[in-house]
Image: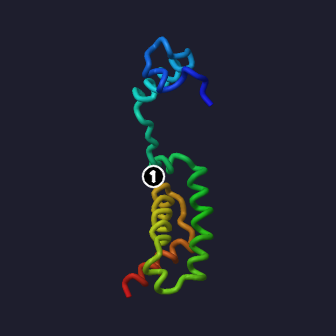
Amino acid sequence: MKAPGHGKAARARGPAFCTEACRREVQLEAEQRRRPAVTVQPATIGDVMQNARLLALVAALVEPLAEDMLANYTLKKWQESPHVDRVREAAETLATAGLDVPAPVREVLTRAEAARRG
């Protein structure tokens, strides 16, 4: 609960009714309006390539995903799954960085291409 004489009502009555806490609040509000919004840029492939640990993590995560896809996907899933595109992006990232693309990942891409063609 705010102290009496604090807040919008006190400010509306004028500076004589505004407490020190009220003045600080007004200053903070004004500062926040002047500050530009902070935006976070998504990582690019170049950012990922510069970090070897992230590349190792990509390789470590995409291989079990590919193995699971090979074991459990039906023809319809191969044609419609968004995971195929993510696996393709991971494979391109690894290849661009000069790393070997794991065999299950290559097999996923082969099966997905065959399912989309026929």
- The residue that appears at 51% across and 25% down in the rendered structure is 7
Residue 65 position, x and y percent, is 59, 70
Q: Nearer the viewer, residue 42 or 91?
A: 42
How was the colour assigned to the protein in this rendering?
Answer: rainbow
Residue that appears at 46% across and 21% down:
11
Task: Please give the residue where the numbered disc 1 appears in the rendered image.
Answer: 45
| Quadrant location, the N terminus | top right
Q: Is residue 13 above or below residue 72?
A: above
Residue 102 vs 24, above or below: the answer is: below
Relative depth, front residue between 3 and 29: 3
Picture residue at 46% right of the left edge, 13% below the top: 15
- Graded by Cα atoms within 10 Å as few (under 14), some (14 to 19) or many (20 or more), the crowding at tag 1 reads some
Percent of width and height locating residue 98: 50, 57
As drawn, the residue found furthest toward the top would be: 16
The image quadrant where one finds the C terminus is: bottom left
Q: Position of residue 40 (x, y in %)?
A: 46, 42
Is 67 left, or right, of 118 in this rendering?
A: right
Question: Where residue 6 sits: x, y (%)?
Answer: 54, 22
Q: Nearer the viewer, residue 52 or 82?
A: 82
Numbered disc total = 1
Which amino acid, by three-letter code, is at mark 1? Ile
Residue 75 drawn above or below residue 36: below
Instruction: Write down the quadrant of residue 12 in the picture.
Output: top left
Q: Residue furthest left?
A: 117
Which residue is pictured at 59% across the width and 82% down the height? 72
Q: Callout 1: helix, strand or loop?
A: helix
Q: Is residue 96 left or right of residue 53?
A: left
